[in-house]
Image: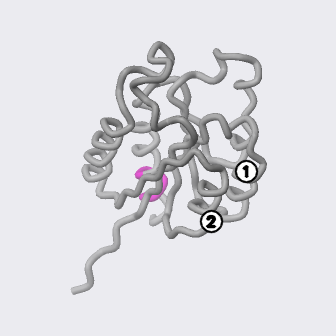
Amino acid sequence: MKKKKKNKVLIIHGPNLHLLGKRETGIYGKFTLKALEKILQVKAKELKLDYESFQSNSEGEIVDKITKNEYDFLIINPAAYTHTSVAIRDALLGVQKPAIEVHISNIYRREDFRRKSLVSDTVIGVISGLGKYSYLLALDAASFFLREKKN
């Protein structure tokens, strides 16, 4: 009997997210990236999703991860690159994979330069301002979209 293939979700954490729990805790919270990863692993297992995550401060590494990996759905927090990276935008357009943009903080309540996203119009949706729950909601949504795609 052939084993049913799980859908694979790739989660990319952009620059400085390795500093979660230390950096501007009033904005980003006191949880660490490691703690967030544990929560996401449990949630992915509950949703019967294969899960891979990646954090990088390098724009090129993020582009490579988007364009050179096998996955069915992408959840991406481009962090500071949200507002500056045409390369990440082009990578998202190039792979034509379903994706959700997430942000821990509400970028629309922050400085003017943070209110413009270069990637928002390339993704299915944006979840912003709900802390770590932004990621959890994105996993729920990814599961929903992947199930709908099969039907």
Instruction: Residue under label 1, please give it.
Output: 89
Residue 20 on the magenta span: no
Q: Which of the 4 image quadrants contains residue 79? A: top right
Q: Quadrant of the N terminus?
A: bottom left
Helix, strand or loop at mark 2: helix
Query: Which residue is located at x 76 percent, y 18 percent?
Result: 112
Mark 1 closeness class: few <14, some 14–19, many ≥20 residues within 10 Å: many
Q: Residue 67 carries which label?
A: 2
Helix, strand or loop at mark 1: helix
Q: Which of the 4 image quadrants contains residue 110? A: top right
Query: Which residue is located at x 54 percent, y 48 percent?
Result: 56
- The magenta segment is 143-147
Residue 137 pos. (x, y %): 43, 37
Looking at marks 1 and 2 on the same chain, the residue that comes earlier in the sequence is marked by 2
Q: Which of 14 and 139 is in front in this view?
A: 14
- On screen, residue 145 versus residue 33, left or right, reads right
Q: Which of 135 and 24 is in front in this view?
A: 24
Residue 55 pos. (x, y %): 49, 48
Q: Residue furthest left?
A: 1
- On screen, residue 93 versus residue 28, left or right, reads right
Label 1–label 2 contact, CB within 8 A = no
Q: Which amino acid does label 1 sit on?
A: Arg
Residue 144 on the magenta span: yes
82 versus 2 height, above or below: above
